[in-house]
Image: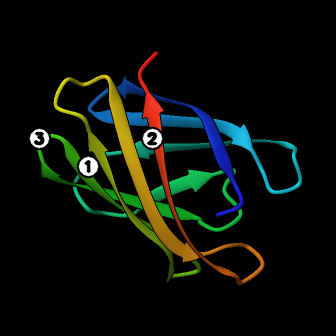
């Protein structure tokens, strides 16, 4: 995937969770996307992501989320987010098709700030 997230913030938004991601796109420009919803496997709107108009998260277990991005009803990205047992890092593994139609597979590890 051509995008690199530098910060990802999870916060309560009423009964929902809001996830805000900031990073750098493939052209080196700032990128920002936001998603608000529940970890129930249902699609909720995502803004600022050129490869998706909806995203779903589903709890697999206490430390693992499954994610799916869709654009115009078609799956563009699938992946997993796994939080370490000590809660100090998370590993994100995603596969899909970028905005130019190129296939990708990426794994990234993020440390809790």
Which quadrant would residue 85 be assigned to in this image?
Answer: top left
On residue 109, which mark appears? 2
Sequence-earlier tag: 1 or 2: 1
* In this rendering, the label closer to the viewer, 3 or 1: 3
Q: Nearer the viewer, residue 100 or 84?
A: 84
Which of pointers 3 and 2 lies earlier in the amino acid sequence? 3
User: What residue is shown with label 1?
Assistant: 39
The mark total stands at 3
Residue drawn 55% across the image and 35% down it: 20
Residue located at (26% from left, 32% from top): 15
Q: x, y (%) of residue 82?
A: 28, 46
Disc 1, disc 2: CB below 8 Å? no
Left or right of 81, for residue 86: left
Q: Are marks 3 and 2 in contact (CB under 8 Å)?
A: no
> In this image, 62 relative to 93: left or right?
left
Q: Quadrant of residue 93?
A: bottom left
Name above or below for residue 26 compared with residue 97: above
In the picture, the quarter occupied by the N terminus is bottom right
**In the structure shown, which secondary structural element does the residue marked by tag 2 occupy?**
strand
What is the spatial separation of the Cα atoms under label 3 and label 1, in whole angstroms?
12 Å
- Viewer-nearest of discs 1 and 2: 2
Spot occupied by residue 106 in the image (x, y as percentages of width and height): 52, 62
Instruction: Give how far across and how far down residue 100 sits, in percent.
Output: 78, 78
Tell me if residue 38 comes above or below residue 74 in the rendering.
Answer: above
How crowded pointer 2 is (Cα within 10 Å; few <14, some 14-19, many 20+) is rated as few
The front one of 22 and 11 is 22
Quarter occupied by residue 66 = bottom left
Circle 3 or circle 2, nearest the eye: 2
């Amino acid at each position: 995937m051509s995008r690199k997230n530098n910060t990802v913030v999870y916060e309560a938004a009423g009964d929902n969770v809001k996830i805000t991601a900031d990073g750098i796109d493939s052209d080196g420009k700032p990128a920002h996307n936001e998603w608000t919803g529940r970890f129930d496997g249902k699609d909720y709107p995502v803004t600022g992501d050129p490869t998706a108009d909806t995203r779903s998260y589903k709890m697999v277990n206490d430390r693992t989320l499954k994610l799916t991005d869709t654009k115009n009803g078609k799956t563009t990205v699938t992946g997993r987010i796994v939080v370490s047992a000590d809660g100090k890092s998370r590993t994100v593994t995603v596969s899909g098709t970028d905005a130019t139609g190129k296939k990708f597979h990426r794994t990234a590890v993020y440390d809790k700030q």
